[in-house]
Amino acid sequence: MKNNVMHMWRTFWFEHVSNTSWSFIRMGLGVILFGEWLVLLPRIPLLLTENGLLTPWVIDPPSMISWLLEPHSARVMYAVHGVVLVPLIGFITGRYTRISAAVLLLYLFYLWQLSYHAFPTTGHRFDVLLLVLFALQGSGKKMMEVWPLRILQLQVSATYMSSALKKSLLPDWQSGNAILGGLEGRYATPLAQWIATQPIPMHVYDVLTWSVLFLEFFIAVGLWIPELRKIAMITGVVFHLMIALLFGLLWFFVIPLCYLSFVSCRAEARQTHM
């Protein structure tokens, strides 16, 4: 019994699988990061330079550390942002993946420092997690240990599950107020604002609210069940498309990108049983 448990544990975390899905995740993440790079480019003077809001240090750090953590002139920040394009291209093309991922990770932490330790969305936290995994694992070999994919699987499932549980406890998510408020909120796109002005009965919003909770729970569980996996993936992609159309939150697409971690293990399991 103990040997069987240990074998299952080693298989779950350290089985060797093809890195095909891992490579597609790398390329997809690289494209997403390039999109974020482009979005940030015209906002550099406002967000990343010494012209923005600054707060004093509680304890003055050494000058070298202070220089690395503080914003600088627009010219310096444009130069730094431009240099980051080199490891970004290397990451997308799979050249020096570990080094490229490590450099991009340091740059994201620098942006995080300048943003007062706040991430814009959950998707940006996935960016950090993926870069950590790529810095550790790389992406140059045809076969790889499965543990980075397992971590992604658990993180994706935990994200949907915790989101559903948290929403189910919030007062606004006990009725359609959450959906209607979102359609009228600060992130609402013109399409969402138009929908909010239509004479839609409140009970429709009630149903939509509870549907969101059910879908998040279903995705969290369904991705682990081979018979439901394809439906869960399609549901998740459509779900995030609706979020993008109604609220303009494109960066959440890094989460359905991570669905590919389940595809790899499913394909490997099929080969193992043949």
Image (cartoon, grey):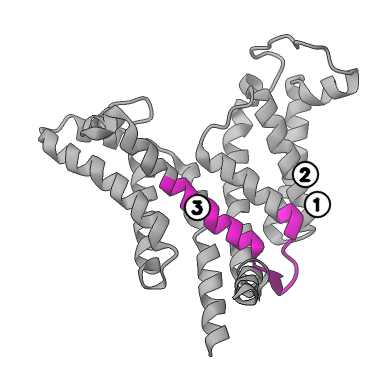
CA separation in Å, label 1 and label 3: 25 Å
Indicate yes or no whether the magenta region holds residue 160.
yes
Name the mark nearer the viewer: 1 or 3: 3
User: Three-letter amino acid code at disc 3?
Assistant: Val
Q: Position of residue 107 (x, y in %)?
A: 73, 37
x then y, percent, for residue 228: 36, 68
Q: Residue furthest bottom?
A: 274
Looking at the figure, which quarter contains the N terminus?
bottom right
For the residues bearing labels 2 and 1, Cβ distance under 8 angstroms = yes
Q: How busy is the neighbourhood of tag 2: few (under 14 within 10 Å), some, or many (20 plus)?
A: some
In which quadrant of the rendered view does residue 232 lie?
Answer: bottom left
Label 2, label 1: how far apart the Cα atoms are: 6 Å
Q: Residue furthest front?
A: 1
Residue 80 in view of the camera: yes
Residue mark closest to the camera, 3 vs 2: 3
- The magenta span reads 134-161
Pointer 1 or 3: first along the chain: 1
- Which numbered dot is residue 156? 3
Checking the image for residue 103, the label placed there is 2
- Badge 3, how many Cα within 10 Å: few under 14, some, many 20+? many
- SS of the residue at dot 1? helix
- The residue tagged 1 is 99
On the image, which quarter does residue 146 sit in? bottom right
Residue 273 x, y percent position in the rendering: 53, 87
Say above or below: 75 vs 206: above
In this view, the residue in front, 52 or 63, is: 63
- Amino acid carrying mark 2 in the image: Val
Q: Is residue 135 above or below residue 227?
A: above
CA separation in Å, label 3 and label 2: 24 Å
Residue located 57% across and 84% down the image:
272
> Which of these two is toward me, 131 or 72?
131
Label 2: which secondary element: helix
